[in-house]
Image (cartoon, helix red, strand yellow):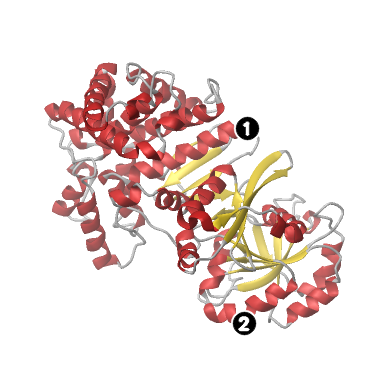
Amino acid sequence: MTDHLARLCFEGLGSTGRYTPHAYTLRLQGVEQSTDHVVYLHEVHHATLNDVTAWGSALHVYARLPAAAGQAFVPLLDACRTTHESLATFASVRLATARHGVLDGVLAAYPDYVGLYGTVTRLVQGIPGPGRKQLAVSALARLCMQTPVLETVDEVGLEAFRLADVPDADRPDSRWRWFARQGPAALSAAAESADRVLAERFGPAAAATDGPDGDLYESTASVHDAAWDAWEEAAYEHLRSLIAATGARTLDLNGHRESSEALIGSVEAVHGDIGLRVPMSDEQRQDDAAVASSVLQQVRHDLAAGDRHRARLLERTPADLVDVLARRPVHGDRPALIVDARPVRRLAALYRWPDDTLPEPSGEPLVAVRVVVDHTENETADGTDPDKVVGHALVPEPDALSELAERWGGRGPLAACVSASCLVDTAWTRRWLEPLGALGPLFVLADVEPDRFVPAWVRDERQVNALTITVEETGRRRAALLFTAGTAWWLVLAEDVTVALMVEYLGRRLGPRLSSDLAPFEPVRDAATAVIGHLLATESFVSFDALGNGHA
């Protein structure tokens, strides 16, 4: 999805984000936290809206089909851009405002979104309480996207389907524009109807948390989930009754699940596994850990300033690089030596390599010592310096690690950083993990979704110790989470929202077996700092999808 028309973007002069039905990519400057939070939450709302609607399921499917079969994707996306961007802009700014205070100027660097935010603000002006405003906009966006498009796809045929097969009244942005023309009265009436349902079914307690000057975080606390879910559904049904007069056909609030599952099944019967899961159930959406995992596996943080770093395999051995690395202080005035392990497929995604450089992706993970090649070695024929190159000196066999450690001789931190995606190769793990761990502290970069490894810790009743770290990097702030269930230290490197989501996930899954004890961390502090700095300098991006993900 390289064409800008094939994605939803939040772009301006500051931090940026872009979303496709595969994932959302963030390039956060780490300078202004409130702006970074707006960008992050903006992309989360794009993902969430697709994951809970029929139109979103259609986008998920067509984005993953071969080019000829998936040619309906861009027209489908174009037909819901205003709906998507309006919800994402309003919701992200309001949530960030609830945390950081008034953010009147936050959209100054993103002028294309000022009008969308103003329109939504006008539509909800008659609704009291920040939580209800948020839920009313969510109900409206879901109503616009919850059309019988999947039934139309089934009737017409997957490859024959075109946007023209969908009546204008059943297209998301047509519905959004209709409500915009109605003005604030429509959403105010829907809120009043929902207030009555809330009072009848749950009494005054939930409504009391969302007064005109209420706290959005208090009103959305999990203890009130059932009440506010009922409120949103009641508002949705009222809006549904209004637009029905135009001939629009609308599914129930969660009426897309069966048709989504059926479409995925029929697609996979023809094209094989396309990496999609059926939509989450009501129970899963009430599970904060499941929601956190769903968000995490779709996020990608770009660490490179522009495109992915260029990379190449070095002819020099890792031992040859010892003296080079020893002259490069990275931790105070001390150097560090980090040995990395990544699957070939992951390396191919992380970097731009010369053609035919890497082995076949089906091969075992590669172990290497990375070094940023001096820019003077990168000059092109005209003397320009395009960007740095991350050189990889391969470690051929586990036995070579002991020689490397001996050559290093304690000049500074020595550690191994293995991506979690390596660990699925059990034969490789049996050969390499113990020798890598013998170098020094062993760090596991979490590049797979937590549902792939935390449930085993829960089953085994493991005690997990976790702590967060703030990383200052050339005037920018990053966040990291280190956690251990034994000898290795698992590492999440991103920013504070991603770290908070992982902590939320671990806490919900592990309960009292999750602790935060600083003492075990002290012996590995220097190595952890060196590994984090190493990753920021040499990793192009971090994400949790190294083994694939999927949503519908």
Q: Quadrant of residue 233?
A: top left
From the viewer's perspective, tell me whether residue 398 is left or right of residue 284. Answer: right
Q: Residue at x 49, y 28 (%)?
A: 98
For the question of whether residue 9 can be seen, the reply is no
Q: Earlier in the sequence, mark 1 or mark 2?
A: 1
Q: Which residue is disc 2 drawn over?
A: 431
- Kindly identify the residue that appears in the image at 20 percent across and 36 percent down: 170
Q: Is residue 48 left or right of residue 380?
A: left
Q: Residue at x 54, y 50 (%)?
A: 503
Indicate the amino acid at tag 2.
Arg
Query: Mark 2: few, some, or many residues within 10 Å (few <14, many ≥20)?
Result: few
Residue 253, image x and y in percent? Answer: 23, 40
Left or right: residue 532 versus residue 547 is: right
Q: Position of residue 483 (x, y in %)?
A: 61, 58
Asked whether residue 396 appears in the rendered view, the answer is: yes
Residue 407 higher or lower than 102, as above or below: below
Q: CA distance from mark 1 to mark 2?
A: 45 Å
- Depth check, front residue: 221 or 280: 221
Of 75 and 414, which appears nearest the observer? 414
Callout 1 amino acid: Glu
Q: In the rendering, at what x and y percent does residue 230 appear?
A: 26, 35
Report which residue position mark 1 lands on.
Answer: 32
- Towards the viewer: 494 or 110: 494
Q: Using the image, tell me which numbered label, if any, was put on residue 468.
A: none
Name the element at disc 1.
loop
